Each structure stands twice: as C-alpha cells, then as structure tokens.
Image (cartoon, rainbow, N blue to C red):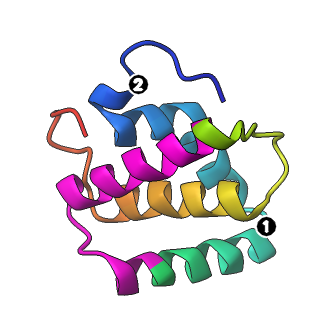
Amino acid sequence: MVFEDGWAVSPLRWLMDTLGDAQLARMGSDPGLVAAIDQHAAALRDAIPLDRETLGDYLLGFLDELRHRGWIYTGEPDEVSLRLTAVCWLTRELGLLEDGHPA
C-alpha cells in the first residue's frame, strides 16, 4: 500500500479506493473470503460503535500501526488485509460514504 499525501483526510474513502473495491469484488466468487470477512466484521461490531467517525478513527490508528511496522499488502489474504476488507465491507453496508462527505 502506498500512503500518498492526504490519505488521512478521508481514510475510509482512501481505503475503499486503494484496497476495498477490488477486495469486495473478490468476495462474489470466494466463499472462504466472505466467511473470513464476516468474522472480522463481527469482531469490529463487538469492539466499537459503527459510525463514520469511530470507524474512521479506528482505521487511522490501525493504518498508523501498519505503517510503523512496515506492513505491505501483497494481494494475498492475511489477517491485516482481511481486517481492512472488513472495514471496507462495513463502510459499504452501512452507507458511510454515500453522502459525499470525506470519510
């Protein structure tokens, strides 16, 4: 993942554009991916309120730690990419990007 200038202004939108759209499309043909994403989404539902601000703040902290660790998205599912995809799935399912405001 490349963290270009301005990514933190609207982290949910940035993640959706960077990883989410492609990963969510893969879910249509990969039942195992769907199950894994569902588990990560359930963990997020249990841990934080699912509103745009809280999910965005969670994502900022998560991505900051990934940057600190030097994590690189390889295109293969791992725990990190599954969690990021779950954030994207929740963002889409909850309609958090539909009002046109940065998220």
Q: Earlier in the sequence, mark 1 or mark 2?
A: 2
Residue stretch in magenta: 44-67
- Where disc 1 sits, the SS reads loop
Badge 1 amino acid = Asp
Give how far apart the Cα atoms at labels 1 and 2 are: 29 Å
Residue 27 image offset from top left, x and y in percent: 68, 62
The mark found on residue 81 in the picture is none
Quarter of the picture containing the C terminus is top left
Residue 65 image offset from top left, x and y in percent: 54, 47
Residue at position x 49%, y 52% from top? Answer: 62
Query: Could you say which quadrant of the image residue 101 lies in?
Result: top left
Residue at position x 49%, y 82% from top? Answer: 43
Badge 2 amino acid = Trp
Residue 3 image offset from top left, x and y in percent: 54, 23
Question: Residue 77, relative to residue 14: is it above or below?
Answer: below
Q: Main secondary structure of the magenta part?
A: helix
Residue at position x 43%, y 12% from top? Answer: 5
Q: Which residue is mark 2?
A: 7
Q: Which residue is mark 1?
A: 30
Q: Is residue 52 magenta?
A: yes
Specify few, some or many for label 1: CA neighbours under 10 Å numbering under 14, 14-19, or 20 or more. Answer: few
Quarter of the picture containing the N terminus is top right
Query: Could you say which quadrant of the image residue 75 lies in?
Result: top right
Q: Report the front residue among 61 and 43.
A: 61
Question: Residue 97, relative to residue 93: is it above or below?
Answer: above
Question: Residue 89, relative to residue 68: is it above or below?
Answer: below
Q: Is residue 27 magenta?
A: no
Specify few, some or many for label 2: CA neighbours under 10 Å numbering under 14, 14-19, or 20 or more. Answer: some
Query: Could you say which quadrant of the image residue 67 lies in?
Result: top right
Give left or right: position of 57 versus 20. left
Q: Report the front residue among 70 and 73.
A: 70
